[in-house]
Image: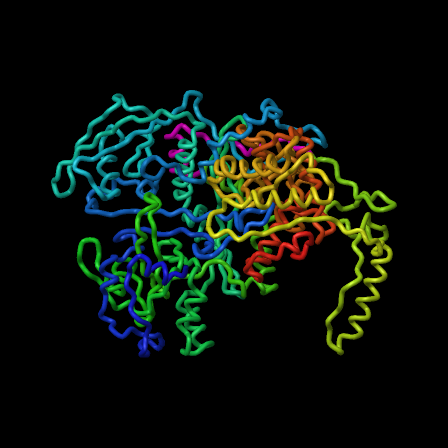
Amino acid sequence: MSGRARVRARGIARSPSAVEMGRPQSSQWPTSVDPSNNEALSDCGFVGTSGISQQYSDSTEKGVNSSEQVMMPFGLVASSDSIEGQRSSQSSGNASHYKDNISSDDAGCTFMERGGKIRRDFLDLGVCTREKLTHVRDCKTGSSGIPVKLVTNLFSLDLPQDWQLYQYHVTYTPNLESRRMRIALLYSHRELSNKAKAFDGVILFLSQKLEEKVTELSSETQRGEAVKMTVTLTRELPASSPVCLQVFSIIFRKILKKLSMYQIGRNFYKPSEPVEIPQHNLSLWPGFTVSVSQFESRLLFSADVSYKILRNETVLEFMTGLCRQTGMSGFTQTCEKQLIGFIVLTRYNNKTYRIDDIDWSVKPTHTFQKRDGTEITYVDYYKQQYDITLSDLNQPMLVSLLKSKRNDNAEAQMAHLIPELCFLTGLSSRVTSDFQLMKVVAEEMRLSPSGRQQRLARLADDIHRNKDARFELETWGLHLGCQMSLTGRVVPSEKILMQDHICQPTSAADWSKDMRSWKILSTPSLNKWLIICSDRAENVTENFLSCLRRVGNSMGFHVDCPKMWFSRCILQKTTTDVADCLKVFMIGALNKWYKHNHDLPARVIVYRDGVGDGQLKTLVEYEVPQLLSSVTEASSNVSSKLSVIVVRKKCTQRFFTEVNRTVQNPPLGTVVDSEATRPECYDFYLISQAACRGTVNPTYYNVIYDDNGLKPDHMQRLTFKLCHLYYNWPGLISIPAPCQYAHKLTFLVAQSIHKEPSLELANSLFYL
C-alpha cells in the first residue's frame, strides 16, 4: 500500500494534483487549485519539531507493504531479518516552568508500552529452550578442535551483589496528559532528587527503595493547579530480569548522549566527526550500536562500530534534478515513485523520518495550527525555532506518518517535512551499482580488526573519562569493566572428497585451485544446452567452448548421475515473518525423499533463517509444532527425529585473536559456545567465512528443538560441513547451504517471477 493509500485510509483529505505552474524563487513545482485549503493540515496539527510536539519515526529499512506477498521457501521462512526502527514519542504541555528539572533523556524514553508490554527486542530473553533439551541441559559446549584465545567486543558490567531494581507505578490526580509535565512535577520532589531514577510518565524505576510501599506527593503546576501524585511499588526485580536489561540499555543511551552522540534509530552517531567523501557527495557519521544482556555467567555490555550513510543532497535538490531530467510531464508520479519509502534525516534535530507521501498542495507559506491553538506559517516557524530561512517558498511538503509505540492501536499522525531541510540517507540501487563509489565507501566502513578494536577501546575510555557519564553509572551502582577475553575452538578443517583423491585445501575459504585437476564425485551430463551470441563474438565463444571442454574433461564432466534436490516456494499473504505453510513444505520434501529411497529419513535437520527480534517464542510455539505434525503424519511407524536451528547472520558480537600485540580475524572454523552465549539457550557462534578486508562477522546459531540428541560437537561440525556445500562457490559461505538456496529462491520469485514456481521445477536448483 502506497503512502497516498495509507493517508486516504486514515481519512486524511488530499487536494488534487496541480494544474498550474509557478516560478517563485527560481523553482518550478506543481501548485494546488486551492492553496488556501488548509483543512487537512489544521485538523492533524503539525508535528515533528521539538518546540511543539515531537513524534518521529526511526525507521531503518523499507518494509513489505501489507498488500504484497511474502515468499516462503522451505529452509527460509522469512524474506528479511531486518529490525523495524524504534519509534519514540514526546509530548509537550504547559510545563515550561519546570523545564530545568527535567532530564531530556527521560522525557523521550519509553520503558514499555501501556499495559506493561516489554519492547519486542527483549521478548526473546524470556524464552528458555535449553531446559527441554535433556542432552545439553547440564553442558552445551563441545570439545573437538584446537583451543584459541579470543578478544570480544563485550565489556563486563559489574553490580553490587544484592543489587535490585524497584519498579513503581505513578498516578496523577487530576490526570495529566503531558508527559513532560508529569516528569517535571515528579522530579521536583526532594524524595527523588538524589536517587538514580528513570521515568517515562507512568512507570518509575529506582535503584533505591522508597521508605513506604505507597508514597503520596503533591505539587502545583505553573498555573497554580494542585496535583496529587501516588507512587506505588509494584515489583522488585533482579539484575537478570528483561525489564532491568531494558533499563540498563536506557542508561547507556543517556551516557552516549552525554558523549555528544545523537540517536538515530537504535544506534548512536557523532555528527561532529564525519567522514567526508566529497567526490561522491557523501558523508559517513561514525557511531556505535550498544546493548546490555545477561550472558552465561554475568551481565555484559556489547558495543560495535556502526556508520550512518548520509548524502550531502537535500530532497529538494534531488527533486530539482529529477525535474530537469524528466520534464514536468509525469514529474509528480516519477518523483513519488523515487522518494516514497526513503528515509530522510532532518539535521536541525537529527531525527529520521520515512517518506510516506508527497503533498503537492501544501507550501511553506501555508499555516499550521500549534497545540496552543495559534497558527503560524512553516517559514516563520523554522525561522523562530531554528533560525533557518527557507529559500524556496513553492516547494511541496513531504508526508511522514508517525505512530506512537506506546499504543499499537493509535491512529498515526501526519507530519509535514520541508524537502529543503531533509537529507537523503542510505544508498539507492543506482548508487550501489557504481563500483567505484562502493569501493570508496567500503574502504571507509570496513574496519580492520585492529581498527575496530581501537574504536571500542576509545569508546570505553571516553565513558570513563567523562565526568557526567561516570556519575550516571555510579549513581545506578554500575561499573563498566574491561573488555572480555574468552577461549574458543578451531574445529578441524574439512577434507574434500574427489573421485580418486582426498583433497586437503591450502585455503579453506576457496578450494577451486585444489580441485581443478581431479575428478569430482558425480556430475550431471551436459547434453542439452546452447549458447546465444552475436556473429562478432564468434571467437570469444570458441575460446569459451574450448576452455569448458578442457576443464570439464579433467574434472570428469561425463558422468550422468545427477544429485537429488527438493525446493519449494509458497506465497504467503501476510507481512509477518512467521510461516504458516511449513506443513506443506515438510510433507512435500518427505514425500519426495520417500519416492527415491522407499523410506523416510531417520533425521531431519531444519535451519531457520530470517528470524526477527521477539519472534523466538512464536517459532517454538507455532512453527515447531507444524514441523513435528508433518513428521508424525508422514509415517504410521517410527517417525523421523527433528532438529530446528535458528540462524542469524547479523549479530553484534565480534571476536578477534591476539597475534604479536595486535588483533586479527579468527581462523575459519572458530566456534564459541561459552561465556558469550546465553544460559537459557543451546547456542553457539561459528566463523565459516573469510574476510579479505574488514572484520569477519560470526554467524549465530540457536538450537530451539532437538530430539535427535546430537552432541554439541556433532551439531557444530554438521553446521560447518553444510557451509561447504553451496554449489555456486568452491569454498565456504557464511551460512549453511540450504539457507543460501532458500535466499536465492525467494529473491528470484520476489524480483522476477511474482508467483509460485511450477512444482515440476522442485527437483532442480533452477534458481542458481
> Residue at the spot x=27%, y=40% of the render?
102
Where residue 752 appears, x then y in whole percent?
Answer: 57, 62
Q: Is residue 43 left or right of residue 23?
A: left
| Numbered label tally | 0
Task: Name above or below for residue 114 compared with residue 331.
Answer: above
Q: Nearer the viewer, residue 684 or 535?
A: 535
Farthest left residue in view: 224
From where the camera sits, is residue 751 visible? yes
From where the camera sits, is residue 363 visible? no
Q: In this view, does 314 lie to the left or right of 444?
A: left
Residue 572 forms part of the magenta stretch: no
Where residue 134 appears, x then y in whole percent?
Answer: 59, 24
* Quarter that holds the N terminus: bottom left
* Quarter that holds the C terminus: bottom right
Q: Which of 740 and 242 is in front in this view?
A: 740
> Residue at the spot x=22%, y=30% of the render?
230
> What span is in magenta?
465-489
Where residue 247 appears, x then y in whole percent?
Answer: 39, 34
Quarter-of-image position of residue 214: top left
> Residue at the spot x=53%, y=26% of the render?
297
Task: Name above or below for residue 376 compared with residue 730.
Answer: below
Q: Is residue 372 left or right of residue 680?
A: left
